[in-house]
Image (tube, helix red, strand yellow):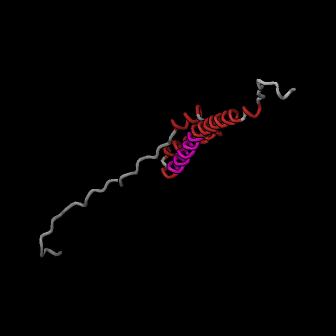
Amino acid sequence: MDISYPREEQPPPKRGPPPAAPAPRDHLVWAIFNTLYMNFCCLGFVALAFAIKARDRKVSGDVEAARHFSSKARCYNALATAGSVVLPLLLGALIVTGVIHLSKLAQESVGFFTYQFSGSDDEDQ
């Protein structure tokens, strides 16, 4: 036994579990909203299916699969929301610009299609 220098007995540092990453979000409420109100091309329903899969995997403890399905649910939710909001706005803008264009065209062509009566009958005689 080596006693040439004094040793301090220190217990090894306590190590807890590594800091866990936060659990992935399942986006279930957003998916339900999209399924009920903004179900563009059934993307809201697909988002709901992936959100339920993400929640099931999160409950079972498979964090990587839950993160994967959560990412897919978020993507389909974003597509359903964008498709349900942007496309009707774009369609409305196209209709408004078409009506404006047609009204200008009709105003310009009024002179072409109207017959103007003259006050003198010189040409008839």
Q: Tell me what residue is drawn at x 66 percent, y 37 percent.
A: 101
Tell me where residue 86 sits by quadrant. Answer: top right
| Residue 67 location (% of width, % of height) | 50, 49
Chief secondary structure of the magenta portion: helix
* Residue 123 vs residue 11, the one in the foreground: 123
Tell me where residue 4 sits by quadrant. Answer: bottom left
Asked whether, in this view, residue 11 is left or right of residue 37, the answer is: left
Count of marks overlaid on the render = 0
Look at the image and say whether residue 18 sits in the magenta stretch.
no
Inspect this view and state whether residue 99 appears. yes
* Residue 124 vs residue 73, the one in the foreground: 124
| Residue 91 location (% of width, % of height) | 63, 37
Look at the image and say whether residue 78 sits in the magenta stretch.
yes
Give the extent of the magenta segment. 65-83
Inspect this view and state whether residue 52 appears. no
Tell me where residue 10 sits by quadrant. Answer: bottom left
Asked whether, in this view, residue 70 is left or right of residue 12, the answer is: right
Q: Tell me what residue is drawn at x 59 percent, y 37 percent.
A: 89
Q: Residue furthest right?
A: 125
* Residue 67 vs residue 119, the one in the foreground: 119
The image quadrant where one finds the C terminus is top right
Q: Tell me what residue is drawn at x 15 percent, y 65 percent.
A: 8
The image quadrant where one finds the N terminus is bottom left
Asked whether, in this view, residue 30 is left or right of residue 39, the answer is: left
| Residue 115 location (% of width, % of height) | 78, 28
Q: Tell me what residue is drawn at x 53 percent, y 42 percent.
A: 56
| Residue 109 location (% of width, % of height) | 72, 35
- Residue 83 vs 62, above or below: the answer is above
